[in-house]
Image (cartoon, grey):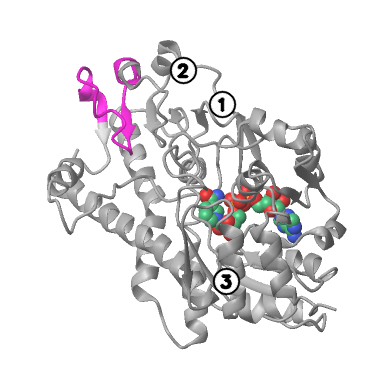
Amino acid sequence: MGRHRTSREDLRERIRRRRLTVGVLGMGYVGLPLALEYARAGIRTFGFDIKPEKISQLQQGQSYIRDVPTAALAEQVQTGRLIPTGDFRHCADCDVLFICVPTPFTAHKDPDISFILQATESIAATLRPGQLIVLKSTTFPGTTEEYVLPLLQRTGLQVGEDFFLAFSPERVDPGNRVWTTANTPVVVGGVTERCTELAVAALELVVQKVVPVRNPRVAEMAKLLENIFRSVNIALVNEMAQLCDRLGVNIWEVIEAASTKPFGFMPFYPGPGIGGHCILIDPYYLAWVARRYDFVTNFVTLAAEVNESMPFYVRGLIEREIARLPVSLERARVLFLGVAFKRDVDDLRHSPALKIMELLWHDGVRQLAYYDPYIRSVEFLGRRLESMPELTPTLLRQQHIVVITTDHSGVDYEMVCRWSRVVIDTRNACRHVRRSRARVVLLGSGR
Ligand SMILES: NC(=O)c1ccc[n+]([C@@H]2O[C@H](COP(=O)([O-])OP(=O)(O)OC[C@H]3O[C@@H](n4cnc5c(N)ncnc54)[C@H](O)[C@@H]3O)[C@@H](O)[C@H]2O)c1
């Protein structure tokens, strides 16, 4: 009689032979592309979500995420390789489970890891020997070992022996055509060496380069460093842009000039504020955990403060231009171009444009409208607002102020400048426009 194979050997063999079942919890911007990638690699993949409407849409082969083409999704669903489901008992059928659920903050900007805990409970309910769990949601250092691990170990199973646990942060950049799930390297840190080794093998099925690190904390902290690096650098140029407005120097020309240095400089650009699910939130995750260690992240928090002040700064620019026209705040018609949080995406989360609209509303500006080819309607201050169906010279002429909050690439900025009374450009979207520049007020240009 042969020796009984251990859980680790069994799982390693399944991964090696690509005879495994994968489960992804959370069918959002991160989880859906990942699940699709495994399915396309020929691996049976369950896609779990708590929202029944998402599951039924996926079951019909319809994608709700721009980077996931419906045709590619439908093919995998029809062949039965990708199985969208709201039935978490199927976690028991999976050898490898990825947790890709949201990690928002509370109203007071403290971390809210309740979705991670809920997803972990779903896995713990049917945990069995031979399963590997990989947390991918962005979170503070210590989450995997201090919060996820105890829930799984309550089952009596041992990590590194019976089941395996790792953290591997997601780096997907929605809208990026060059860097995709397959060709973007990923970092992974397991709770034990065996956990790391198995997680590397599982990830290598769909990712070309997997970088193992010592433990989950290194991986958790690396993700925060990557995002906070961006937050700090964006804050720096945002502060510089405000100074340039006073000095009468054009920050965009300054950045272009500095970018000619071939080493030691990397361009970042100012804007109306940071939105989305990552860069805005992550500094608060780090600041929160730091407080537990009697440490105040002054630098990181200052960057967040500068970035969060930008919608207020842009509000000031808009109200100044309204006053110059002159027209009263009540009668001023303001059109926003682009409300998604960044270019060419349909993601509205923490959009600075919405924040600016709210601030203007509080100041008495009532005639607010927007045009965004990616966002059909928005809700702000309990009101529903539809996007203008089309951007036309007539629509532009009717406005007192046009504010470019997001520089979507499909917009004709030449036309915007030609027909608008005043354009407030917070993204330098009109840089190639030659005529009618007199009407453009460019953030950070000193006018
Ligand atoms: N969007 C990005 O570009 C990006 C990039 C890198 C990292 N991240 C991180 O990845 C994580 C997920 O982000 P996202 O953008 O995919 O979020 P998302 O909101 O698009 O998707 C999350 C999905 O998880 C589902 N969900 C919530 N609780 C669940 C549970 N208990 N079980 C199963 N499903 C559940 C939600 O219904 C939703 O469909 C976050 O931590 C985020 O910070 C996001």
Under tag 3, what secondary structure?
helix
Query: What separation in Å lies between label 1 and label 3 (alpha carbons)?
Result: 49 Å
Q: Is residue 260 left or right of residue 24?
A: left
Q: Earlier in the sequence, mark 2 or mark 3?
A: 3
* Disc 2 from disc 3: Cα separation: 53 Å
Which of these two is toward me, 65 or 179? 179
* Residue labelled 3 has its Cβ within 8 Å of some atom of ligand 1: no
- Please tell me the numbered disc located at residue 387: 1
Left or right: where 401 falls relative to 436? right
User: Which residue is more in the foreground, 83 or 342?
Assistant: 83
Counting from the top left corner in percent of width and height, residue 251 is at: 19, 45
Check disc 3 and give the amino acid type. Glu
Report the residue marked by disc 2.
Answer: 391
* Image quadrant, ligand 1: bottom right
Which residue position holds label 3? Answer: 197
Residues shaded magenta: 416-440
